Image: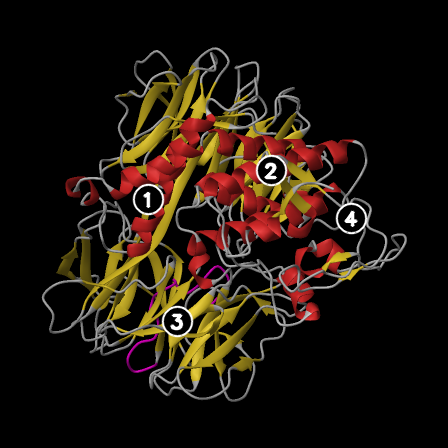
């Protein structure tokens, strides 16, 4: 009896105009929100059940479906509706193509199942393509449970960034990562609807931008340009959201220069913000800004970043540009900084709520410590690292990150007395930023990532339950939460970039492949490069790639972390992380035809570091550790035999280093940057490497075996030397000057003949945002 057309009939020719998509979506979400508030879950939402009347109102039909309904024509849903008079555990109820993962697997459903289905419908009418359509109903259900749809931006480039975020959140596999209230979903869609003209005009403005503005984006990676355009559209959408209805998050951009952000903290007044940044290749320094001003004023402290600001307005700052530095105290109003303590970690201090004392993360003689007040140890370990301590609002607990030798990180809390230490949440894929307590002290917000995903904002309660708060393209980094619940967060667009100079060429070549290329090995003739892709471009899984340095396309060899290329170029040694009940292990991946082979390494773990091949092409060396022990270097025959240690504990092979001498008799073992020894393969006394300076890393042997190529990661131009490891004599080889605005070269590969080199750097573009309305 409703006069109008179903959404299926409206979209029969494909996608709909964006303005109509968000208008229909907002009305449908509002209707669902009212039903959900009354305790009603639809369970069978689909385009046939959304009727748009002649006057533009959306009607939701067929609530409480309890019998089989046959389609009236071939233009409607091609999938059958499966139903029973009532819902039973394990029963599949709903239209297959629009089921939620919990429906498809026969699990109990609640209002968040309707959110998933609405997300599927919005995806379809925006792109003209079903999110999970397969050839059969069974295949479609399997895709809903385990697969992700093609990114909406690939199918509809003009789709607003905020609409993409909303659809992606609705399509989260875990119901906990969808909206906590359908009313919030309706408000977000209404915000996009009400500002759709402002948002889409941003795309047109970008397209019409003068050439001189476009040239500011380096064309090294086309993907980086696409991401930058997406961020610009997002900024316009964020501006529109600042006028959104109550309940919708609003984003206010605070920084506008090109470069990389450090830490950021609220001052006691909640309006003044102090942050660290390295703009346009300048040295890192601190800046002051206000939420109502686009301008930033620099402090005079050189090489400094903010750690915390006390309730009385005193700053704790970190002097230096490395992972550790000197803790200092300085007044917020300006003046000289008073140095307090060396060896404090980045983001490694926080003021107690009363502003009298600091808790610090400190490293002393290989012991990681949390101290409160300074000098009183409340947590200490030789097996774990501690970082980013933050006080609870009541001042009785401290949240912090803890991580083991393998890099596995978790969130923990401890009483200020040092008692009742508890791990709340683990399995982090990354821990940028700091853990921040909500003002009521009931939750700790963190930024972390699942493997292959960008960091997003999560909340963890004191029982350890984790929920998604916000996700965005690029990487989010949580910095601070004010006393009234406003959030300081950085947005980073990150790419791991590879550049190199190949024998016979005069200019460096861009050898990057996807967005997260991390160097592993370079063949002796400089013609073959092995690297690992670690970010989104690899499809959510860390993968090993091989590429010729002439610029030909890269070849994906398999999953894992690349370690070293065999002398004959036919195999790559790689490590595979523990998953699906399998232990972490080493594999040999063929570069041509053949099957991957797993090496037997019972009782060992922590393989994802450096390694190498002996010249015979049969034996390999690698870093690993027995459970409960520190890393050491092992040697193993790939055809037979078990791994045998050749160095003491606390010794390893630096990643992207060729550790084996040309004659195969010595292995370079690193104790720390600037401290290394040569270990005989067949046993015998170790020989310390002479003349190695603090922070210096050997990366390759010379072809005659008499020298090591060495460099420091910090510093641009990056100076590379040839060092005699026995006498300590050195001579300069060359300076490497990256075209990127960076201050260090973390990984460098040099061909043994010295005619080719490849290095990797990280490109980061950051913006700082003040966010209101997150829940």
Q: Nearer the viewer, residue 149 or 596?
A: 149
Q: CA distance from mark 4 to mark 2?
A: 33 Å
Q: CA distance from mark 1 to mark 3?
A: 28 Å
Indicate the secondary structure of the residue bearing disc 2: loop
Q: Nearer the viewer, mark 1 or mark 3?
A: 1
Q: CA distance from mark 3 to mark 4?
A: 42 Å
Q: Is residue 634 above or below residue 42?
A: below
Residue 649 in magenta stretch: yes
Q: Nearer the viewer, mark 3 or mark 4?
A: 4
Residue 643 falls left or right of residue 517? right
Residue 346 at x, y percent in the picture: 43, 37
Indicate the secondary structure of the residue bearing disc 1: helix
| Mark identifier at residue 545 | 3
Query: Label 4 belongs to which residue?
Result: 109
Q: Quadrant of residue 55?
A: top right
Residue 326 in magenta stretch: no
Q: Is residue 357 above or below residue 474?
A: above
Residue 257 falls left or right of residue 533? left
Indicate the secondary structure of the residue bearing disc 4: loop
The residues colored magenta run: 646-664
Residue 612 falls left or right of residue 442? left
Q: CA distance from mark 3 to mark 2?
A: 56 Å
- Image quadrant where one finds the N terminus: top right
The numbered mark, 1 or 3, whose residue comes first in the sequence reads 1
Q: Residue at x 48, y 62 (%)?
A: 539
Query: Label 1 belongs to which residue?
Result: 229
Query: Label 2 belongs to which residue?
Result: 54
């Amino acid at each position: 009896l409703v006069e109008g057309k179903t959404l299926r009939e409206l979209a029969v020719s494909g996608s709909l105009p964006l303005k109509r998509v968000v208008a229909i979506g907002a009305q449908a979400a509002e209707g669902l929100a009212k039903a959900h508030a009354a305790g009603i879950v639809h369970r069978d939402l689909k385009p046939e059940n959304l009727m748009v009347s002649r006057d533009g109102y959306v009607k939701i039909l067929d609530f409480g479906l309890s019998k089989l309904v046959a389609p009236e024509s071939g233009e409607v849903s091609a999938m059958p509706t499966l139903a029973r008079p009532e819902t039973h555990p394990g029963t599949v109820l709903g239209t297959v193509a629009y089921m939620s993962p919990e429906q498809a697997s026969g699990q109990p459903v609640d209002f968040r199942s309707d959110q998933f289905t609405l997300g599927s419908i919005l995806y379809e009418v925006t792109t003209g393509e079903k999110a999970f359509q397969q050839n059969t109903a069974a295949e479609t259900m399997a895709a809903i449970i385990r697969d992700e749809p093609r990114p909406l931006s690939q199918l509809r480039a003009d789709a607003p960034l905020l609409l993409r975020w909303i659809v992606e959140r609705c399509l989260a596999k875990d119901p906990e990562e969808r909206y906590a209230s359908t009313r919030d979903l309706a408000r977000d869609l209404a915000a996009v609807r009400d500002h759709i003209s402002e948002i889409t005009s941003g795309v047109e403005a970008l397209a019409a931008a003068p050439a001189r503005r476009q040239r500011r984006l380096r064309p090294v990676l086309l993907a980086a340009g696409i991401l930058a355009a997406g961020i610009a559209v997002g900024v316009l959408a964020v501006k529109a959201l600042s006028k959104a209805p109550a309940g919708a998050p609003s984003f206010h951009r605070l920084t506008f220069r090109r470069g990389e952000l450090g830490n950021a903290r609220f001052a006691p007044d909640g309006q003044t913000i102090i942050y660290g940044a390295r703009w346009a290749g300048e040295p890192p320094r601190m800046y002051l800004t206000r939420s109502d001003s686009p301008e930033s004023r620099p402090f005079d402290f050189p090489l400094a970043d903010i750690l915390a600001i006390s309730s009385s307005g005193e700053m704790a700052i970190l002097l230096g540009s490395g992972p550790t530095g000197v803790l200092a105290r300085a007044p917020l109003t300006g003046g000289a900084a008073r140095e307090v303590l060396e060896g404090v970690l980045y983001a490694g201090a926080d003021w107690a709520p009363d502003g009298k004392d600091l808790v610090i993360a400190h490293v002393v003689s290989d012991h990681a410590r949390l101290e409160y007040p300074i000098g009183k140890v409340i947590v200490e370990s030789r097996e774990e690292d501690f970082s980013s301590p933050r006080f609870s609002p009541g001042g009785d607990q401290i949240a912090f990150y803890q991580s083991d030798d393998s890099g596995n990180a978790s969130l923990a809390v401890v009483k200020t007395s040092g008692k009742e230490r508890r791990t709340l949440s683990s399995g982090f894929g990354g821990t940028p930023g700091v853990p921040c307590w909500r003002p009521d002290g009931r939750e700790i917000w963190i930024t972390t990532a699942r493997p292959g995903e960008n960091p997003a904002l999560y909340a963890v309660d004191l029982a350890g339950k984790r929920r998604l708060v916000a996700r965005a393209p690029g990487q989010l980094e949580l910095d601070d939460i004010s006393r009234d619940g406003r959030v300081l967060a950085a947005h980073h667009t990150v790419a791991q970039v590879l550049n190199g100079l190949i024998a016979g060429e005069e200019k460096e070549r861009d050898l990057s492949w996807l967005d997260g290329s991390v160097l592993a090995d370079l063949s002796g003739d400089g013609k073959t490069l092995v690297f690992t892709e670690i970010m989104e471009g690899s499809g959510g899984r860390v993968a090993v790639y091989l590429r010729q340095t002439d610029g030909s396309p890269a070849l994906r060899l398999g999953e894992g972390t690349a370690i070293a290329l065999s002398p004959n170029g036919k195999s790559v040694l790689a490590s595979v992380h523990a998953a699906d009940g399998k232990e972490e292990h080493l594999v040999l991946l063929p570069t041509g035809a053949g099957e991957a082979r797993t090496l037997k390494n019972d009782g060992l773990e922590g393989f994802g570091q450096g390694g190498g091949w002996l010249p015979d092409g049969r034996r390999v060396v690698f870093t690993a550790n027995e459970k409960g022990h520190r890393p050491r270097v092992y040697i193993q025959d790939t055809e037979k035999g078990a791994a045998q240690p050749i160095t003491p504990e606390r010794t390893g092979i630096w990643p992207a280093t060729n550790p084996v001498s040309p004659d195969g008799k010595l292995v370079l073992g690193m104790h720390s940057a600037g401290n290394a020894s040569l270990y005989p393969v067949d046993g015998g006394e170790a020989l310390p490497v002479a003349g190695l300076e603090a922070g210096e890393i050997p990366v390759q042997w010379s072809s005659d075996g008499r020298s090591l190529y060495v460099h420091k990661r910090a510093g641009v131009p990056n100076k590379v030397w040839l060092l005699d490891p026995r006498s300590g004599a050195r001579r300069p080889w060359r300076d490497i000057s990256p075209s990127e605005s960076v201050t260090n070269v973390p990984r460098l590969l040099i061909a043994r003949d010295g005619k080719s080199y490849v290095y990797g750097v990280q490109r980061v573009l950051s913006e700082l945002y003040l966010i209101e309305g997150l829940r």
